[in-house]
Amino acid sequence: MAVINNERLQCCIVSSEDYKKGNIERIPVADLIVAEVMNSVDLRKLIHIRKCSPNAKLLILSSLQISPEYYVIPEISPDMLLLKPYIYSKAYKVIHKIFFWMYRDRYRRQGMNNILQVLTGGEYYYFDYADISYLEARDKKIILHLQKQEFSFYSSLQKLESSLPDYFVRCHRSYIVNFMFIQKADVMNSVFYLDKKTVIPISQKYKAKLVKIFQRNNTENLLFQSQ
């Protein structure tokens, strides 16, 4: 039995002997389960293990002695089935490809969660949220202020605001700021300082909400000034 850990995509092996000695509920929730089923005993074990990871992808390596009819029951519901006769070396390659696909797909999806996708001029552009210091609305365009460049495209802050991570804060009708880039919040004078040259205005509409955000986060390295 091979399991990919839900967070680290690690593989752990549970042999029949370990199964008898160990507590199967302690196995981490899995993304992928690979099980070789030779008899009805293995099938019962699989049902037990399946309860621990009901949403995992399941690949069964099956003996012809077990009728495939048993596998379609809701307690098992496999996603993939490999029937004997098969060569172990080739079966291993298939399993390895599945592991690789799961690994690649997981990190592709995780990576996309950290990326802003922009369609302009019929082409897609991708920007890591961590590189965006602030967004500015100007002349019906959005200007992304990145660490080393600027990029503009037609859109509105209202459309983008709901899709941005929580560490982006709206401070003005024309500005959304990446909280991580704020070096000083001077609410008394209604400005954020991102560095010595970059000063972002805070409008009265958003001031009260921003004060609560900063008080809640209690950021040690941020100089917070208010009346």
Image (cartoon, rainbow, N blue to C red):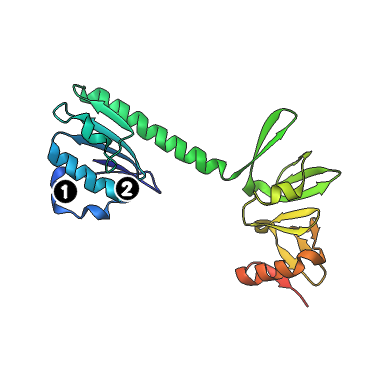
Residue 70, image x and y in percent?
21, 35
Contact? badges 1 and 2 (CB < 8 Å): no
- Residue drawn at (24%, 35%), measured in percent from left and top? 71
| Circle 2 residue | 53
Q: How far apart are the alpha carbons under marks 1 and 2? A: 18 Å
Residue 58, image x and y in percent?
31, 37
69 or 165, which lies in front? Answer: 69
- Residue drawn at (80%, 56%), measured in percent from left and top? 173
- Residue drawn at (18%, 29%), measured in percent from left and top? 67
Circle 2 Cα neighbour tier, 10 Å, few/some/many (<14 / 14–19 / ≥20): many
Q: At numbered mark 2, what does the secondary structure look like: helix, strand or loop? A: loop
In this image, 3 relative to 104: left or right? Answer: left
Residue 146 numbered tag? none
Residue 136, image x and y in percent?
78, 49
Answer whether residue 70 is visible to the viewer in this image: yes
| Circle 1 residue | 18
In this image, 44 relative to 209: left or right? Answer: left
**Is 53 placed above or below 185 here?**
above
Residue farthest to the bottom?
227
